[in-house]
Amino acid sequence: MKVRSKTSSALTASRVISTPIGKLTLVASAAGLQQVIFGAKKVAKVKTIPTVVKRNLNLAEKQLQEYFVGERKKFSLKLDIAGTEFQESVWYALNKIAYGKTISYAQQAKLVRKPRAFRAVGTANGKNPVAIILPCHRVVASDGTLGGYGGGLAIKRKLLALESQ
């Protein structure tokens, strides 16, 4: 990912896109993509969307569509997300997990230099505002079971299956 902003832009816009895992709602600001929401959600409407916000939505949609047809393995988007220092370290560590691979919550905890914080890592992953883009679906339980996923386990299975092809 290219940029992250500690302060969210006030003006945001959203777009609902259709994907093989169902509808996704994308929310972006002038600074970058803010959210990927599972399902079609109503987000405050803006009468006039600035060009830079449209560009961020267009790029996110394009890259997600490329991902779903197997043409994109890594995302290159500006992000406008903010969390605690720990959450951000967990979210950005997700980019170290290679496409088609999985790691455990314990392994991710080691990546962020908090080896005993595997439960906290799972909680932070659950608050990932840009799921799929920052691939928390690639994190599984130490015993190989799927663990949890904000979009539901059926979607997590589909994403992992897509990446295993």
Image: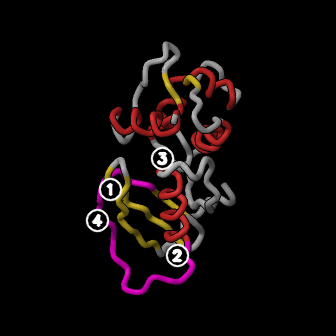
| Amino acid carrying mark 2 in the image | Val
Please give the residue where the numbered disc 1 appears in the rendered image: 23
Q: Which residue is mark 2?
A: 53
Q: CA gap, disc 4 to disc 3?
A: 18 Å
Q: 165 or 148, which is in the foreground? A: 165
Amino acid type of the residue tagged 3 in the rendering: Ala
Measuring 49% from the left and 45% from the top, which residue is drawn there? 128
Say which mark, if any, is on residue 36. none
Which element is circle 2 on? helix
Q: Nearer the viewer, residue 160 or 129?
A: 160
**Which corner quadrant holds the N terminus?**
bottom right
- Distance, label 3 to label 2, CA atoms, is 19 Å
> Measured from the top left, where is residue 90 in percent x and y?
60, 37
> Cα distance, mark 1 to mark 3?
13 Å
Residue drawn at x 64%, y 36% as measured from the top left: 98
Badge 3 is on which residue? 131
- Can residue 124 be spotted in the picture? no
Q: Main secondary structure of the magenta part?
A: loop
Q: Earlier in the sequence, mark 4 or mark 2?
A: 4
Q: Which mark is residue 42?
A: 4
| Magenta span of residues | 36-55
